[in-house]
């Protein structure tokens, strides 16, 4: 499966942004999906994950209550709604697909994902 992330940009502190991750090549419903981010000079970190059906989600503590992951399997697309954005949310955001894992709680590390999109930059500034 090929993944294409989009929707990044410059947003003010406290603002909102919605990222999209469009899949092609294979049906997205076959995959548990995740979002990761990488800030300048830092390791890529887990943001959140969503089950194949969309019925379960799991988030990093740093974004819990502010970010929401959803998916539309009919459109082969996963979304990351980001609200109340902070400067520390500035990063390149990546979507990823996991073939083997089905638990959103377990799929929180890079190694558990085998397909990655190219990333989209989110900059939060005053």
Image (cartoon, rainbow, N blue to C red):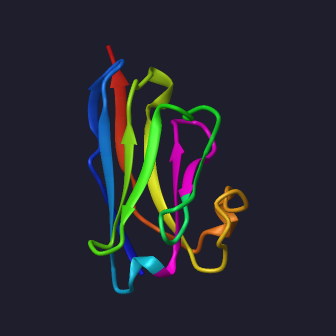
95 over 61 or under it: above or below: below
41 over 125 or under it: above or below: below
Left or right of 9, for residue 121: right
- Residue 60's quadrant in the figure? top right
Q: Which residue in the rendered view is the most extreme toward the right? A: 106
The majority secondary structure of the magenta stretch comes to: strand
Left or right of 108, for residue 121: left
Q: Position of residue 11 (x, y in %)?
A: 28, 27
- Would you say residue 98 sits in the magenta stretch? no
67 over 80 or under it: above or below: above
Along the viewing direction, whichever of 67 and 19 lies nearer the viewer = 67
Q: Position of residue 19 (x, y in %)?
A: 33, 49
Q: Name the residue located 46 percent from the left edge and 38 percent from the top edge.
A: 67
Q: Which residue in the rendered view is the most extreme toward the bottom? A: 26
Numbered marks: total = 0
Q: Which residue in the rendered view is the most extreme toward the front? A: 55
Q: Position of residue 12 (x, y in %)?
A: 29, 20
Left or right of 11, for residue 58: right
The N terminus appears in which quarter of the rendering?
Answer: bottom left
Q: Position of residue 44 (x, y in %)?
A: 59, 48
Q: Name the residue located 35 percent from the left edge and 43 percent from the top edge.
A: 121
Q: Name the residue located 48 percent from the left edge and 63 percent from the top edge.
A: 54
The C terminus appears in which quarter of the rendering?
Answer: top left
- Magenta part of the chain: 30-49
Q: Name the residue located 67 percent from the left edge and 56 percent from the top edge.
A: 108
- Would you say residue 46 sits in the magenta stretch? yes
């Amino acid at each position: 499966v090929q993944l294409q992330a989009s929707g990044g940009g410059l947003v003010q502190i406290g603002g909102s942004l919605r990222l999209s991750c469009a899949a092609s090549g294979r049906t997205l419903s076959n995959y548990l999906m995740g979002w990761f981010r990488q800030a300048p000079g830092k390791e890529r970190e887990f943001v959140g994950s969503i089950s194949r059906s969309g019925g379960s989600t799991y988030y990093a503590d740093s974004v819990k209550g502010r970010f929401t992951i959803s998916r539309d399997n009919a459109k082969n697309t996963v979304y990351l709604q980001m609200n109340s954005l902070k400067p520390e949310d500035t990063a390149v955001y990546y979507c990823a697909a996991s073939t083997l894992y089905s638990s959103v709680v377990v799929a929180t590390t890079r190694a558990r994902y085998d397909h990655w999109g190219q990333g989209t930059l989110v900059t939060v500034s005053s």
